[in-house]
Amino acid sequence: MKIGNIVFADPFVSLAPLAGYGDTAFRRLCREYGASLTVTEMVSVKGLVYGNEKTATLLTTAPCEKPSCVQLFGSDPEFFRKALSIGTLDGFDIIDINMGCPVPKVTKCGEGSALMNDPGRAADIVRACCDSSGGRPVTVKHRLGFDDDKIVAPGFAAKMQEAGAAAVTVHGRTSRQGYGGVADWDAIAEVAEAVTIPVIGNGDITSIDDAVRKISKYGCAGASIGRGALGRPYVFSDSPRDRVKTILRHIRYALSYMPESVAVRTMRKHICKYLAGVPGTKELRLKVNGVESADELIAGIKTLEEPLC
Ligand SMILES: Cc1cc2nc3c(=O)[nH]c(=O)nc-3n(C[C@H](O)[C@H](O)[C@H](O)COP(=O)(O)O)c2cc1C
């Protein structure tokens, strides 16, 4: 599997970008458990150009995140060009463009999945990024289409390829579907038929075996896991893991990249995911939601039984 001139071992199974969860501590864990690639949370090109401080923190990566990939969102090709020329993104190896976000705050500005309704502009953005990326591969993550009755992904992906995209990740839902229903992998297979660049299939994968099966059944070059990795960073490996040790390691990583108050708040969200559906943990979940210090958080997790998952 190759993205531009970057070679990945097979099977290629990456962590999908996850705003609000996919910070560098979580991504580091996923890499250590075997994710082929991890992608930053979506970063606004306007935020980058205007030097927004919060935007800058989204760009932190762990040394093990190599090759590295940043995901950008916006609607104006010139902002993408500028964002790539100010130097802040020079450390990234792959530039990914978000054309799949369904959130109205984003789409009403013509960003995210709204670009699927404006393929000309989407192609201009890819061209602007290719012109200013210094030879680094530019990739696109998109959906099947914007509206349910208009599946445009095969033609759209072909346009992105023509504009210079080195790979596409296709989430098998329309924007209107949000995260509901079931991902349509037959439609993803049609995209893989329509282009020669690698297609990374995405939607509803729950295990590494499932990813490998889908890659081969639907003719994809790789697969990408989103929600299936939340609270389960070990989804990228095929052996059972010690949940308590994983959470404690996750807390340690969060503390090494973030101020304690931010790490604790972030970890509360992640711990909810780790404990979702685990019998007998309701009390611990409630307790964790009220803790303010890392010591309290760690003590709470150490009371957890049932280590293997
Ligand atoms: C909480 C959350 C945050 C997400 N953030 C992003 C994002 O920043 N960029 C992006 O392209 N997709 C984002 N997505 C979409 C996922 O990357 C992925 O395409 C989608 O969840 C389908 O894959 P899955 O079924 O494996 O979760 C997000 C999804 C969720 C649930």
Image (cartoon, helix red, strand yellow):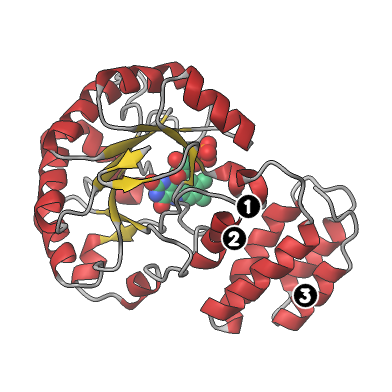
Q: CA distance from mark 1 to mark 3?
A: 19 Å
Quadrant of residue 204 within the rendered picture: top right
Number of marks: 3
Q: CA distance from mark 3 to mark 2?
A: 17 Å
Proximity of marks 1 and 3: CB atoms separated by less than 8 Å: no
Identity of the residue drawn at 83% across and 63% down = 284
Q: Nearer the viewer, residue 7 or 107?
A: 7
Proximity of marks 2 and 1: CB atoms separated by less than 8 Å: yes
Residue 182 visible? The answer is no
Identity of the residue drawn at 23% across and 48% down = 138
Q: CA distance from mark 2 to mark 1?
A: 6 Å
Identity of the residue drawn at 24% across and 76% down = 51
| Comes first in the chain, label 1 or label 3 | 1
Examine the rendered structure and indicate whether residue 113 appears above or below residue 287.
above
Label 3 sits on a secondary structure element that is helix
| Comes first in the chain, label 2 or label 1 | 2
Q: Residues within 10 Å of mark 1 (few under 14, many from 20)?
A: many
- Residue 169 relative to residue 296: left or right: left
Q: Which residue is mark 1?
A: 233
> Residue 26 in the image: x percent, y percent?
56, 61
- Residue 85 relative to residue 295: left or right: left
Identity of the residue drawn at 39% across and 19% down = 189
Q: Which residue is mark 3?
A: 298
Quadrant of residue 187 within the rendered picture: top left
Label 1 sits on a secondary structure element that is helix
Name the amino acid, label 2: Leu
Which labelled disc corresponds to residue 29? 2
Tell me the mark number nearer the camera, choosing from 1 and 3: 1
Name the amino acid, label 3: Ile
